[in-house]
Image: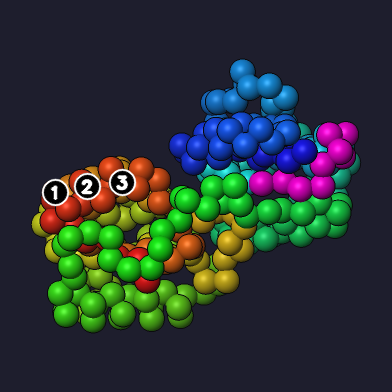
Amino acid sequence: MIGLFLGDTDFSKIVLKKIKKLKKKYFIIDFSKNNDFAKEKNSHRISIGKFGKIIDLIKKQKSNKVLFAGKIAKPKFSTLRLDLKGIYYMPSIIKAAKLGDAAIIKVIIEILKNEKIDVISSIHFNPELTARKGLHTKIKPSRLDIKSINRGIKYLAKTNSYDHIQAIAVRDNKIIAKEDNRGTKKMMSKLKNNSGGILIKFPKKKQDLRMDLPTIGIQTIKDCKKYGLKGIVLKSKKNIFLDKSKSIEFADKNKIFILIK
């Protein structure tokens, strides 16, 4: 029995579909904003503040493994109703929240570990959602593009462990935009049309790769076209790549390269 902590985005639905296809036994804790999994069998809606209830459910289902998929929004701590374990654990989560989403995730994993519950990779059942190293389009980056990409990768390697940065845009060997806690799309929307930049989207430094892998899909590639980006660079086996074939086809058609490092 596998516990599925499911949030928003299509990724959570893709994971659930694969679990069903593999005929794995599962139960769901629905963390989506709109209770997207209410009609699914064995689905439960539990507040993040009710840690005791969450842990009791996992143990009642005779499960010692859970998987996180989809975006789980940071709660408004002031409005949370806490049970006893929620009261015990919440101070460490609130403290971590000041450092960013990656810090919250690390604390939640530690809490579950303390309760003898393992968190497995979000792509454990969906390895096909990652991409192999190499160029995935007919369109190729120029020598100057490669220089800019290397500059961007070095920059990301030097960022703070808990920074919000999962993505940057580079051009002419310079950083022209940096992601903040509002996400990649918001970062790109600030670029001028025909920016000529390159999007680099990597996991955060020291990010726990079992959860919250940076994700792209067809909409990301369409946004690249909209804001005049000429390419996108991902990390091999450390990004979730949805709608892969459609994305590559659209990228080629619109002269956008997709490079996996």
Q: Residue at x 23, y 77 (%)?
A: 146
Spot the residue most to the front: 22
Kindly identify which residue carries mark 1. Answer: 253
Question: Of the residues shown, which amino acid type is indicated by label 3?
Answer: Ser
Question: Of the residues shown, which amino acid type is indicated by label 2?
Answer: Glu
Kindly identify which residue carries mark 2. Answer: 249
* Rendered location of residue 257, percent (x, y): 21, 61
Mark 3 and mark 2: Cα distance apart in space: 6 Å
Question: Of the residues shown, which amino acid type is indicated by label 1?
Answer: Lys
Q: Work out whether residue 91 or residue 237 is closer to the camera in this orientation and state it.
A: 237
Q: Secondary structure at mark 1?
A: helix
Q: Work out whether residue 217 or residue 89 is closer to the camera in this orientation and state it.
A: 217
Q: Residue at x 53, y 44 (%)?
A: 71
- Discs 3, 2 touching: Cβ within 8 Å: yes
Does residue 79 appear to the left or right of 184 in the view shown?
right
Kindly identify which residue carries mark 3. Answer: 245
Q: Secondary structure at mark 2?
A: helix
* Rendered location of residue 58, percent (x, y): 82, 39
Query: What span is colored magenta in the figure?
Result: 59-67
> Is residue 61 in the magenta section?
yes
- Residue 139 visible? The answer is yes
Q: Tell me the quarter of the image containing the N terminus.
A: top right
Tell me the mark number nearer the camera, choosing from 1 and 3. 3
Q: Residue at x 63, y 46 (%)?
A: 68
Q: Which of the 4 quarters of the picture holds residue 131?
A: bottom left
Q: Answer few, some or many: residues within 10 Å of disc 2's Cα (few below 14, many 20 plus, some between 14 and 19).
A: some
Q: Is residue 19 above or below residue 140?
A: above
Q: Work out whether residue 16 or residue 153 is closer to the camera in this orientation and state it.
A: 16
- Residue 87 visible? The answer is no
